[in-house]
Amino acid sequence: MRSKKFFLMMLLMIVAVVSAACGGNKSASGEKEDTKKADNAEVKVVSSEYTLPEDSTTKLGEGELILKVKVSIKNTGQKPLSINKRSFSLYQDDSKVSDVSMYSNNEGLSSASLNPDKSTEGYIYYQVDKGEKFQLEYTPETYGDEKVEPIEFTIDGGSSDILDTAKKLDDPAKALLAYTDITLFGKDNDNFEKLTGENKREIVTDYLEGGQKSLIKNMGIYDEDQVDKKKLNKLISTIQNVYQDKAKVKAVTKTITSDEATVETTVTPIDSSDLEKRVQKRMEEYVKNSGKDYISREELISPTIDAMVEELKKVETASSEKTVEVKMNKTKDGKWQLDLNDYTTEDYFSSFFKN
């Protein structure tokens, strides 16, 4: 079960704190089809939407996005028609816009020689200012002194339909924060299932049950009956509250393809660097004040948990932050889920504490 594997990954934060103390989807279209004819071609703008670069080599400026335009071209002439993305140009305020190469999706408009009555389609990509109006020109390839007037389409990048596609680009980042909410922070997130497609109750239940078992194991306890489960749950709750109150996180989607996204996170962790010393000091005082010559390990379990709860409440926010990129996978129904097999997931959650 996926959720079982999920809590094992997420318990990294609980174990880190306690160990120290103890020693495909089709994209939404933002435009209706617009068809125009030239002397030898019928051209359609099938859809227009905003997207993000597929990797970090394309740097976007403030307010910039990638405009993804799907076009269809049919040869209505009598001779073969050469087609490639250079047949198209995009303008913003009479200035030509730079095109962007996108390879991983295999959706780009390919170069082709169309025989009469044949057609092809594909996407072309441009780096643009979000919300502006654009003019897309198609100029057929000509030979000699032949002149053909270009076809021009207007694309309103500020229309509500196209702007809605920009909002969806935040979904991978929102999904990652939703996972963080219901597990690490121990708080509800009403959009979790909508964003991830995961069963929230199942994830939370497995997380808490696994948390108990992991704590018991990492405290060196072999008999679960020796542990007060209420106190153990209180410890887990305290850890979650500390992360929720003291840690900070921001996330933004940086790259996106048809099946995965990269989310850039900025995490300000909790500072647990002196937690071990503080808990050890409390336990030394406990043993000294008991007046006993010997206290068994079993007798120390409950007071140790109490000490950890009290000292965890004193943990503060760290003075430095860390940037981590996290890989998110897109499901067939358009949801975004953590890639549990990717090292970036572990890097992300481990960045919430500073030893």
Image (spheres, rainbow, N blue to C red):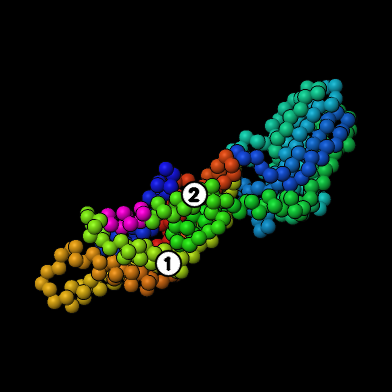
Label 1 environment density (alpha carbons within 10 Å; few <14, some 14–19, many ≥20): some
- Element at label 1: helix
Residue 13 seen:
yes
Q: Quadrant of the N terminus?
A: top left
Q: Sequence-wise, which precedes: disc 2 or disc 1?
A: 2
Q: Badge 2 is on which residue?
A: 199
The disc placed on residue 283 is none
Q: Residue at x 66, y 54 (%)?
A: 167
Q: Residue at x 47, y 46 (%)?
A: 339
What amino acid type is highlighted by mark number 2? Asn
Label 2 environment density (alpha carbons within 10 Å; few <14, some 14–19, many ≥20): few
Image position of 96 (left or right of 325)? right
Image position of 210 (left or right of 154)? left
Image position of 206 (left or right of 95)? left
Q: Residue at x 62, y 40 (%)?
A: 25
What is the quadrant of residue 103 in the picture? top right
Q: Over which residues does the magenta segment extend?
A: 209-218
Identify which residue, 289 or 193, lies in the foreground. 193
Q: CA distance from mark 2 to mark 1?
A: 23 Å
Image position of 255 (left or right of 272)? right
Q: Badge 1 is on which residue?
A: 241
Q: Residue at x 55, y 44 (%)?
A: 330
Question: Does residue 117 show up magenta in the picture?
Answer: no
Q: How far across and how far down the image is residue 207, in percent?
A: 40, 54
